[in-house]
Image: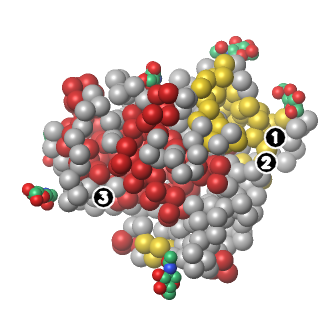
Amino acid sequence: MPVLNTMRTSFFLTLAAIGSAIAQRPANTSICDYYTTALFGNSNATNEYSLLVALVNTVVIGNYTKPNVGVRVPGILTPGLYNGVLSDILPFFNGALASSNRGGSSGVAINFLDDGGAAPLMKSMPAYTTTSNQYKLMTHLYQFFGSLLGCSAYGSTGFPAYSGSASMASVHRFMDLDPTDLGYFIAQVALAAASFGVADTDVAAVGAALQSLFGYRCAPPTTVIAAQGAQLQSVCEDDTCPLAPNATCAAYPAITPAMDANATGAATASMGTGVGAMTVTWNETCGCHMTQPASNASFSVNMSPTSTMSSASATATGSMTQASNAGVGMREGLGALALAIAGVAFVL
Ligand SMILES: *[C@@H]1O[C@H](CO)[C@@H](O)[C@H](O)[C@H]1NC(C)=O
Ligand SMILES: *[C@@H]1O[C@H](CO)[C@@H](O)[C@H](O)[C@H]1NC(C)=O
Ligand SMILES: *[C@@H]1O[C@H](CO)[C@@H](O)[C@H](O)[C@H]1NC(C)=O
Ligand SMILES: *[C@@H]1O[C@H](CO)[C@@H](O)[C@H](O)[C@H]1NC(C)=O
Ligand SMILES: *[C@@H]1O[C@H](CO)[C@@H](O)[C@H](O)[C@H]1NC(C)=O
Ligand SMILES: *[C@@H]1O[C@H](CO)[C@@H](O)[C@H](O)[C@H]1NC(C)=O
Ligand SMILES: *[C@@H]1O[C@H](CO)[C@@H](O)[C@H](O)[C@H]1NC(C)=O
């Protein structure tokens, strides 16, 4: 990945120079193009893709670029609290849950951290090779978010168009995601953006777009990727998710709670090595997963639904709390998250 490494160097240098002082984005410039120019000097396919790599990798493993503007990002692989409720989506990534939709009428377990886990992500790469589940997931995420953020070079040489599953509803149908998991995911996207100096108003716009697209139960078909047309996109189909205006529930696939990958119990999965390393074990007593980050740390994100995005930056620097040595459990079927993300690569 020589290109990525080169860009990474220039990215870090530029970021160090600009700090958090980024001026107001003009209305006629996309969030992608504006911040690419701010961070890399000019907005072309190489630089826009590098921005998406840095952003998405930060969403997944937490802040890893040095320096950032002083915002800590736990990342979606680290369990945390959203409005006081625990979210732990790691089991959707590491094969601990049969939550992928590649199995037809039932979910199947797939390890999406099968190509180095956090280690290559920390080098601003998607994976070590180009044939793994991890590579497909990560590159699809760069592409998907590149479209969502309006990258002008999206679909041109150097910034491939999104090639994953068209319907996020199908992709996430075996996850039973709830507002806590989706909220935690969106909060990580917001924090990641804030960590690169993205203005609060733009962070809020991204968060609102994600909530609107994915957060309303039975939402009618919506176009995200222009070439794929209108598709069912809601990933929050649990009963506790807010009902969409003009809800079309009959169009949605039945939602099945994510099942443990190993019905006999005692399943243990581990993810890569390095800063993001974690273990997940099944606890028979509570019927839950016990997740233990290697750092023995779990992070709490306290954000109210209405203030989540606009206050992401302040929250990240001010009230993020770290509970040391805290193993945390996730009740089965309570949502795990979801990852708008984990799902993007499920159907390839
Ligand atoms: C945005 O608008 C400004 C001023 O109206 C103009 O100078 C600039 O070229 C425009 N940028 C794009 C990408 O259209
Ligand atoms: C984009 O601009 C950078 C300089 O910022 C340059 O190194 C790179 O080659 C350019 N990429 C393309 C595809 O033109
Ligand atoms: C993440 O950001 C926080 C706040 O700036 C910082 O203290 C921490 O060292 C960063 N972590 C990494 C791995 O860069
Ligand atoms: C609901 O559907 C009606 C009729 O198609 C449309 O006019 C209206 O804008 C829709 N409302 C929303 C919030 O999408
Ligand atoms: C499932 O659990 C059994 C019994 O503990 C164990 O022997 C087996 O290795 C586990 N399989 C997986 C894939 O974790
Ligand atoms: C398993 O869960 C029970 C009930 O929540 C808890 O008391 C126990 O400490 C857990 N076991 C481990 C090994 O964490
Ligand atoms: C994490 O906590 C466990 C149990 O308290 C301890 O044995 C282990 O050494 C800790 N790991 C780290 C990296 O601090």
The image shows residue 98 at horizontal and vertical percentages of 72, 53
Query: Which circle marks residue 332 in the picture?
Result: 2
Visible residue check, residue 49: yes
Q: Residue at x 64, y 54 (%)?
A: 179
Crowding at mark 1 (Cα within 10 Å: few <14, some 14-19, many 20+)? some
User: Would residue 176 appear left or right of 26 to someone viewing this image?
Assistant: right
Q: Quadrant of ligand 3?
A: top left
Dot 3 or dot 2, earlier in sequence: 3
Q: CA distance from mark 2 to mark 1?
A: 6 Å
Q: Calculate the distance from the C-alpha at mark 3 to the C-alpha at mark 2.
A: 36 Å
The figure's colour scheme reads: secondary structure
- Callout 2: 10 Å neighbours few (<14), some, many (20+)? some
Tell me residue 314's x, y (percent). Answer: 45, 34
Which residue occupies the foreground of this view, 341 or 98?
341
Check contact, mark 2 vs mark 1: CB within 8 A.
yes
Q: Give the residue at x 65% y 49%.
A: 180
Ligand 6: does it lie within 8 Å of the C-beta at label 1?
A: yes
Front residue of 13/273: it is 13
Image mark for residue 150:
3
Amino acid tagged 3: Gly
Name the residue located 63 percent from the left edge and 49 percent from the top edge: 181
Amino acid on which disc 1 is placed: Cys
Q: Secondary structure at mark 1?
A: strand
Q: Is residue 196 above or below residue 326?
A: below
Position of the N terminus by quadrant: top left
Badge 3 vs badge 2, beta-carbon distance below 8 Å:
no
Mark 1 — residue?
Answer: 288
